[in-house]
Image (cartoon, rainbow, N blue to C red):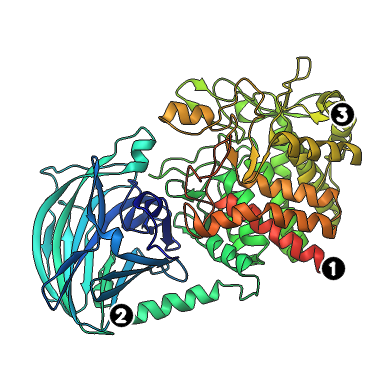
Amino acid sequence: MDCSYMEIDILNSKEWIYTNGIGGYASSTITGCNTRRYHGLLVASLNPPADRKVLVSKLEEKITDISGNSFELSTNQYNGSVHPEGFKFLTSFERKPFPLHVFNAGNCQLEKTVFMVQGSNTVVVEYCNKGKKTFELAVTVFLTNRDYHTLIKENESYNFWTEGKDNTKTIYAYYGANPVYINHSNGQWQAKGYWHKDYEYSREKERGLDFNEDTYAAGEISYQLKPGEKAHIIFSTEEEMLQANAGQLKQQESEYQQSVSLKTKDTFFNDLSIAANQFVVNRKSTNSATIIAGYHWFADWGRDTMIAMRGICIALNKQEESKSIIRTFLQYLDGGMLPNRFPDWGEEPEYNTIDATLWLFVVLHDYFETFKDKAFLKEVYPKLQSILESHIAGTRYNIHVTPEGFLFGGEGIAQLTWMDARIGDHVMTARHGCPVEVNMLWYNALKIFDSFSTQLKKKSTFTPYIDLFEKNFQTFFWNEAVGSLNDVVIPGATPDQTLRPNMIYAESLPFTALSELQQNSIVALVQQKLFTPFSLRTLEKDHPDFKPTYQGDTWQRDNAYHQGTVWPFLMGEFFMAYLKINSFSNKSVAQVKKWMKPLKKHFYEDSCLYGISEIFDGDAPTTGKGTIHQAWSIGTMLQTVTLIKNNTSLK
C-alpha cells in the first residue's frame, strides 16, 4: 500500500493485527500511532485465550544520518496536536505475510517488520537498513502492564524494575507483576526511566470512553546500521526467549504462515483463509481449540463460534480443528445449553443464549456433509438428544416448547437472541417469545437430529415435534399481507411484524418450512428493504426506531446496535439464500460476486487491513465500526466463496 500521499487521518484509520494462536496479539495503526486502548506491540494472553494484558505499548524510532540530521519516525496524538510527525516519512505498508513498514527519511530507508510467534506471548520486531547510507537507529521502548480494557496514568505502584545486562533485560512493572523479557541484537541499551504523558486515543474518545494514557519509557537501544544490515528486538513473557534467535523465529513463523495458506489461484479466497486462522486459538482450560469472536475485545462466544466455524473451519476442511472446537463447548453443556461466553477472568461461563446451542446442530450438519464422519456423529449423538429433551422439558430463562411446537424463551431483562444489547435494566431490543430465527434453528435442530438418527440407524422420538411445527408455522409466522415472516410470535398475542433480517434464516439454513413462492418473497423483500453494499440493515429505514449511525457514548451506540446498524455476517446468509433460490445459476453467482466487491475492497484497504469489521452504519454505510476484525464476518464470507466454488465446479 502506497502511503506517501495519504493524510494522517486516513493513515490512522487503517489498522493491522497479528495474532499468536492463544489469544494474544500485536496491533496498531499503520503509522504506529496507537488510537485505541487495545493497541499494543505485545498484548499477551496470560490464561489463553483470556486475561489479556498490554505489556509493551509501542516503540518509537529515530534515525540519524552520517551528517547528523535526525528524523523521528513515530507518530502520536495529543490534545489538538500530532507529535512527532513520523507519518510523513512512511512511504508504504504491507500486511502480508507480516506487517511491514517502509520509511524514507533524508537519504535513509528503513524497513520495520513485526510478527508474533505462534503459541507464545512473544513479539519480534526486525529493522533493516534498505538504503545506501549507514545511519544510527535509536529505538525507545514504552511499557505498560495493564488489563487491555483499562488505561493507566503515572503512579507510584509502578517502578519498572530492570535486571540483566548486555543484550537481555528482564523488567518488572511492579512487585509481583509478570515480567517482560527483552532480547535484542548488538546495540547500546541506555536506561530512560520516565513517564510519557497524555497520549490521546482517538477511537476511545469517539466511543465516549476515557482516552488519555501515560506510558513508561524503560530504555533506548541504539544501533549503527550499515546498508543491508539488520537489527531485532524480541519481547516475551517467556524467559527462554532471552536465548532465542530472531532469524530462526522468523523462519519458523514464515513456515507456519505458509502452512495455513491454501495456495490457490484465488487470492481473495486464500487471504480470507489466512485471516480466518487468526481467530482459532487454544483454550487452556480444556486444552482444545476455540474461536475468538472478534478483535480486539471479544473472547470466545458460543453463538459467534458456531456461526463462524462453518466457514472458518468446516468450509476449509479443517476436520480435527472442527472436532476440537465442538468438544470444547460440549464440555460445558449444562441444562441442555452451551455457554454463550467464557469470561476473561475465569468465572463460571454464562448461559444467556437461546440460539448458540441450536447452531451446534447446523454446525454438525455441515461437518457431516463435509467429512462423513459417523464415528464423531456417534460420539456427540447422546448429547444432542439431551439438548432436545432439555428444551422440550424446559430449561433456564423460561426456554420451553409451546403447545404449537415453537421454541419460546425469555424472562425479565435477559437478552437471549443475537440482538442482545442492554444497558443495566434497559433492554434495547426486547424479543421475548418465539423469535423467527430461533424457531427456524429449532426446526433445523429437529430435522438434523432426525437425519442423524437415520444415519446411525437409531429411532428418533422427536419426529412428532417436526410435524407439529410444520402444521402451525405458516399460521403464526407467515405475514401474507407483506409477504414476510413475523419477527417474534407469542401464541395468543399480536405478533411483532417488525421488518428485520432474521427471516433470512428461513431460507439460508439447511431446512426450510416455507414454500418456494414464500422463499422468493422473503429474499426479494430483504433485498428491497434491508440490503446495503456492506450487508443487511438490522431494521428497515422506515421504522420510527431506525438509528442511521452507530456513534457516541455507550448508551447511544448500544441503542443503535440492532436498530438499523449493518452487520457484515448477515451478508453471507443473504448470499446463501439468494444462491439457493436461484439454484446457483451462472447469473446469480455473477450477481453475488458483484455484490461482494465492496466488502472485498474493505478487506484489503479499509479499517483492519486483511480483516472485516463487526458493523457499519445503517444509513449510507462506508466505514467499518465496532471490532476491527470479526470472526463471523470472515466466516460467512468464506462460506459463501466455498459454496460458489463447490456448486459451480459441478456444472
Give residue 190's position: percent from left, percent from top: 9, 67
Residue 448 vertical position relative to residue 501 in the rendered view, above or below: below
Residue wearing tag 1: 650
Q: Is residue 71 left or right of residue 385?
A: left
Residue at disc 3, secondary structure? helix
Residue wearing tag 2: 130
Mark 2 or mark 1: which comes first in sequence?
Answer: 2
How much space separates mark 3 and mark 1, taking CA atoms? Answer: 34 Å
Residue 398 vertical position relative to residue 369 in the rendered view, above or below: above
Give residue 270's position: percent from left, percent from top: 60, 68
Q: Within 10 angstroms of label 3, few (less than 14), some, or many (20 or more) residues?
A: some
Give residue 624's position: percent from left, percent from top: 51, 46
Q: Within 10 angstroms of label 1, few (less than 14), some, or many (20 or more) residues?
A: few
How much space separates mark 3 and mark 2, taking CA atoms? Answer: 68 Å
Question: Of residues 532 and 422, which is closer to you in this image?
Answer: 532
Question: Of residues 605 and 387, which is closer to you in this image?
Answer: 605
Front: mark 3 or 1: 1
Q: Amino acid at mark 3?
A: Gln
Q: Is residue 547 left or right of residue 442?
A: left
